[in-house]
Amino acid sequence: FTRTKNKKLNQKPPVCFRSKMSLSNRDPLVVGRVVGDVLECFTRSIDLRVTYGQREVTNGLDLRPSQVLNKPRVEIGGEDLRNFYTLVMVDPDVPSPSNPHLREYLHWLVTDIPATTGTNFGNEIVSYESPRPNSGIHRIVLVLFRQLGRQTVYEPGWRQQFNTREFASLYNLGLPVAAVFYNCQRESGCGGRRS
Amino acid sequence: MLSSAKHKINHSAFSVSSSSSSLPHSYSQAKNMTQVTMEEVWKDINLASLHQHRQLNIDHEPVLSNQNPNNSIFKDFLKKPLNQEPQPLPPSSSSSTLHRSLPPPPPETVLSLNPHSINTHFDESARFGCFGMKRGGQESDESRGDRRHKRMIKNRESAARSRARKQAYTNELELAISHLQKENARLKRQEEQLKMAEATQHQTKRKLQRSWTTPF
């Protein structure tokens, strides 16, 4: 029985074909398939710092529902207070990563965040709903977009089957300027390890 | 000659169905048993694939039983006249050994599932050799194979996700380490500079203090 390579062509992470400045192919966002499943390949240009309590979110960090009950502190970079940013928080692995037919689930949507400030200064269009995955290990992605100006964003009718790409296109947000993701599984999950 | 025949059968069977990896050796097995020509085998294989194994021949039993992962062919064997029944067992066991002795089949892509499924179905057909499941259970056999297949794929995907998760976290840690090392070096340099600046300042401070002290 020979060891087989993956037969499906879409098993490998997407390759970022952009310039050298954009995400490298080893970037956690690419390796973790966030670029591909949720976002297009982009270039980081604005700092994004997400903190739950004392814990700063780094890509691929493992958090449990009890640790993400309340909305995190989000601080963004940039320089000019006249630039406004939108933050989107989605779960692309609903209801389960092996069968994500409800992709994506919108957990939080904040617009009109001035540069150098945080979500406290923005407009919470969709209130924060804490992730409570039931099955599997879900990726929770926070994406930052730059707005063209202050704009009215209408809240979607429902949280599930949200599409970040379409949303960005609808409001002319362009490519993301920052993104970070963490992994979340149910409280009593085994951490993806058995025995 | 034989190798080209094997090669040809391998290719066509690959386009026809997914389980052709064991065909070469079963073909050689069949050839050993009776003097059958390559064209006949070829024709029968095509027929079998087109008409869903309706035409069966004693020479092609091992070939077709290997070709069809389901045991419906074997059931057809069992329905045939009795003098043919003893045949299926020896070929299945011997061709399985043949299979293991030969090097792994060349087409690595779709066919690679087959060695596994063929081996399991050999086990099952050995069990069915006791004629236990003559009638019912044909549907569950197929769905069992399908379910196993689906489960395998799901498991593969899950494993790939798990690897990606691990790799993403590792890469993030490496980036963080590199970032922290740079910052550490920078801060240390800064500290050195401040220390030196403070040392010179401290000396001047002393002088100042001295100049300020007076007896009263």
Image (cartoon, coloured by chain):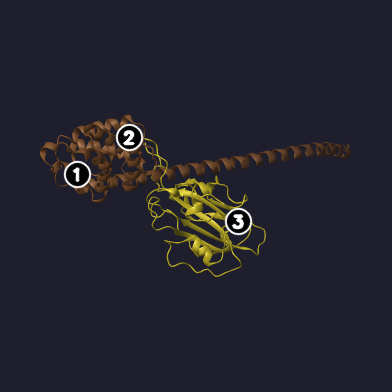
Chain B: give its colour.
brown
Q: Which mark is residue B56?
A: 1
The answer to which of A161 and A76 lies nearer the viewer is A161
Q: Does residue A139 show up? A: yes
Image x and y of residue A22, in percent: 60, 51
Q: Does residue A128 show up? A: no
Chain A: give its colour.
yellow
Image x and y of residue B124, in percent: 22, 38
Left or right of B141 in this view: B190: right
* Residue B21 to residue A52: above or below: above
Q: Are marks 3 and 1 in contact (CB under 8 Å)?
A: no
Q: Are marks 2 and 3 on the same chain?
A: no
Residue at 26% over, 45% down: B43
Q: Amino acid at mark 3?
A: Ile
Element at badge 2? helix
For label 2, the residue is B2
Q: Which mark is residue A76?
A: 3
Q: CA distance from mark 2 to mark 3?
A: 70 Å
Q: Amino acid at mark 1?
A: Leu
